[in-house]
Image (cartoon, coloured by chain):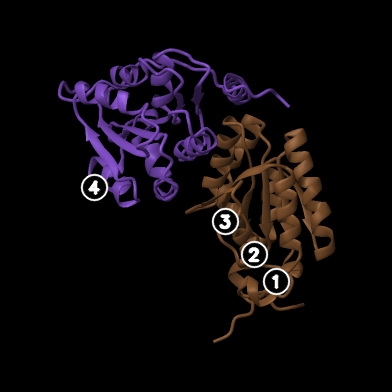
Chain colours: A purple, B brown
């Protein structure tokens, strides 16, 4: 199952994180975490292996705590649908340094490829916009992805939301660290915080 | 049993002020909440505090994830909710064990001590059990004069020992909600 018209998820994430500088990246449960790992392990990566629906809120907590750092949440359509209310919470808080990117393959890829709501009716960009995230758009070409990757570093104009329709092909998993205590301590260390 | 005030101005209590003082002393910065009448006075104080960020949620589990992110970013937080919201958090509470972050929540109880609304009783009855099964320590405050020391102990073990802790603020303390036509 592959379509030449759709963007490739690994290329999209690699382009988003290529010149990441001090960006903190949060990966939603599932393939998004593998995509971030495939782009290269980094001490500012927060990989999620559970907590479905929580990726955007974790990103919001970091963004509020570190308002001068760009924070990007990269997640899938299923994970985003489970935490849809968090878009309303972000819309209310309006953290200028937060970017949310949904890799939308319209299926639950980890569980056998069952159709998600975005395959038929749910419009995540419309939902984000109606929740007060006015900077919400679909990205359809790699040129748009590259321009958006630069925009991500602007910590004065967020929050912003992008949906990218991607090829639904399941790729070989690139397994990141999955020890949460290690992952969170490593990020804290990178930001200058010591263990208790 | 005493009646619960519908607005903070109607019957200002001292214990919400005690909680606010403890949160300030522990440098709590992010305060996610789903509103509850029992928390209304504290929420007002948080909304007016320049050092604190009040974050209204659509559902309580958002608050658990927010506090994990806050900790990753170097800040402490506390989640304010009602007992019925605890059930909404169950899977997200995994984060407290996975990240071993200093999780603190203050829960106003319903479904006990003169409850009028039967729909509050099932979740109110299982609130402590849900926390304990999820690896969260449970402390309780029943009377106004013990709130300060209970919240202080909870904040101490949460923030100093990374021991996830919930304080259940008893309905007897808050007063049963009065339903009038």
Tell me, for residue B12, which label it has, or none: 1
**Residue under the image location 24 percent in, 38 percent down:** A137
- Residue B88, image x, y percentages: 55, 51
Tell me how far mark 2 sits from mark 1, CA to CA.
Answer: 8 Å
Instruction: Report, in whole angstroms, how far the alpha carbon at label 1 lies from the one at label 4.
Output: 48 Å
- The chain identifier of the residue carrying mark 2 reads B
Q: Residue at x 40, y 14 (%)?
A: A38
Q: Badge 1: how crowded within 10 Å, few (<14), some, or many (20+)?
A: few
Q: Which residue is rendered at x = 41% and y = 17% of the image? A: A173
Percent position of residue B110, x then y: 66, 66
Residue A191's place in the image compared with B63, above or below, is above
Camera-side mark, 2 or 4: 2
Query: In the image, residue B116 lies at what x, y percent?
Result: 64, 77
Per the image, the residue denoted by label 2 is: B41
The answer to whether residue B172 is seen in the rendering is: yes
Q: Are dots 1 and 3 on a single chain? A: yes
Are the two marked residues, 4 and 3, in contact with CB atoms closer than 8 angstroms? no
Q: Is residue A21 left or right of residue B27?
A: left
Report the residue marked by disc 3.
B47
Label 3 marks a residue whose chain is: B
SS class, disc 2:
helix
Q: Is residue A2 visible?
A: no
Name which of mark 1 and mark 3 comes first in the sequence: 1
Report the Cα–Cα distance between label 1 and label 3: 17 Å
Name the chain under label 1: B
Number of numbered discs overlaid on the protein picture: 4
Find numbered disc 3 in the image and state the secondary structure of the residue it sits on.
helix
Q: Residues within 10 Å of mark 4 (few under 14, many from 20)?
A: few
In the rendered image, the vertical position of residue A15 relative to residue B164, given as above or below: above
> Which image quarter: residue A96?
top left
* Residues behind callouts 2 and 1 on a single chain: yes
């Amino acid at each position: 199952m592959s379509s030449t018209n759709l963007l490739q998820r690994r290329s999209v994430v690699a382009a988003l994180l290529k010149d990441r500088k001090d960006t903190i990246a949060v990966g939603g449960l599932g393939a998004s975490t593998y995509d971030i790992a495939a782009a290269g392990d980094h001490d500012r990566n927060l990989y999620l292996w559970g907590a479905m629906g929580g990726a955007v809120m974790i990103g919001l907590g970091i963004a509020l705590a570190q308002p001068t750092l760009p924070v990007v949440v990269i997640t899938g359509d299923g994970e985003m649908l489970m935490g849809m209310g968090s878009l309303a919470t972000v819309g209310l808080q309006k953290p200028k340094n937060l970017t949310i990117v949904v890799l939308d393959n319209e299926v639950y890829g980890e569980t056998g490829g069952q159709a998600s709501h975005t395959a038929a009716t749910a419009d995540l960009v419309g939902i984000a916009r109606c929740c007060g995230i006015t900077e919400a758009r679909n990205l359809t070409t790699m040129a748009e992805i590259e321009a958006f990757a630069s925009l991500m570093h602007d910590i004065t104009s967020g929050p912003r939301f992008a949906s990218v329709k991607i090829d639904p092909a399941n790729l070989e998993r690139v397994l990141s660290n999955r020890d949460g205590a290690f992952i969170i301590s490593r990020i804290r260390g990178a930001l200058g915080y010591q263990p208790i | 049993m005493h009646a619960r005030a519908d607005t903070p101005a109607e019957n200002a209590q001292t214990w919400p002020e005690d909680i606010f003082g403890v949160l300030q002393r522990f440098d709590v910065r992010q305060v996610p909440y789903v509103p509850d009448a029992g928390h209304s006075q504290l929420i007002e104080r948080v909304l007016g505090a320049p050092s604190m960020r009040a974050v209204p949620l659509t559902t309580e589990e958002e608050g658990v994830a927010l506090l994990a992110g806050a900790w990753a970013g170097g800040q402490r937080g506390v989640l304010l909710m009602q007992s019925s919201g605890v059930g909404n958090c169950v899977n997200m509470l995994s984060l407290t064990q996975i990240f071993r972050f200093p999780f603190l929540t203050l829960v106003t109880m319903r479904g006990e001590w003169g409850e009028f609304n039967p729909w509050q009783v099932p979740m109110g009855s299982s609130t402590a059990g849900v926390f304990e099964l999820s690896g969260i320590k449970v402390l309780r405050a029943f009377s106004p004069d013990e709130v300060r020391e209970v919240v202080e102990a909870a904040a101490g073990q949460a923030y100093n020992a990374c021991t996830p802790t919930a304080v259940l603020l008893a309905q007897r303390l808050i007063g049963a909600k009065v339903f009038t036509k």
